[in-house]
Image: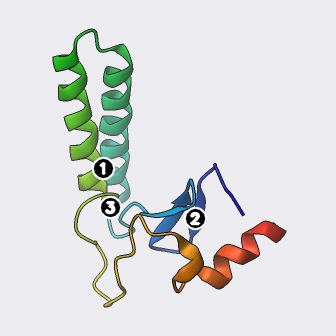
Amino acid sequence: MSFNSTKVIPQKFSIFKNRLSHCTNLTLPEAERAALVKELMQARLAVKNAKTNEDVKTAQGKVHEAKVALGERGPVWWNDGAPDVNRHHPKNRLQAVWWRGLAQD
C-alpha cells in the first residue's frame, strides 16, 4: 500500500510517502497558526526563487523554523504521553489499523 498524498491521522500525525509526520499543533490559536502558515509559504517560495546556494540554505532555514513553530518538526507538542513515531512507517505502529483502512477510502 502506497500513498503519495497526505493522509491525516486524527490529531497528531499525517502520512506522507508512507511515513508518519507531526501535524500542526492543534493548540495554536488560529491567528498564530495562520501567521505561521503564511511565513512557511513565503519561505517555500523563497526556496523556489533562490538564485544562489546561500539563498537556498537561508530560505530552507526559514522553512525549518516555521515548521518547528507550527509543531510539524522538533519536539512533540502534545503532553498525553503518546509516543513520537515521527518518520516511522505506520504498518508496525499503533496507527496500523487506521492506515490499512485508508486503502478502502
Residue pointed to by mark 1: 67
Q: Give the mark nearest the N terminus, 1 or 3.
A: 3
Identity of the residue drawn at 25% across and 44% down: 64
Task: Name the front one of labels 3 and 2.
Answer: 2
Task: Tell me the quarter of the picture where residue 8 sits.
Answer: bottom right
- Position of the C terminus, as image quadrant, is bottom right
Residue pointed to by mark 3: 29
Residue 45 drawn above or below residue 75 = above
Determine the CA span between mark 3 and mark 2.
Answer: 20 Å
Residue 18 or residue 39, whichever sits in front = 18
Identity of the residue drawn at 38% across and 23% down: 45
Residue pointed to by mark 2: 8
How is this picture coloured?
rainbow
Identity of the residue drawn at 22% across and 68% down: 75
Residue 54 in picture, x, y percent from top left = 16, 19
Q: Give the mark nearest the N terminus, 1 or 2.
A: 2
Q: Secondary structure at mark 2?
A: strand
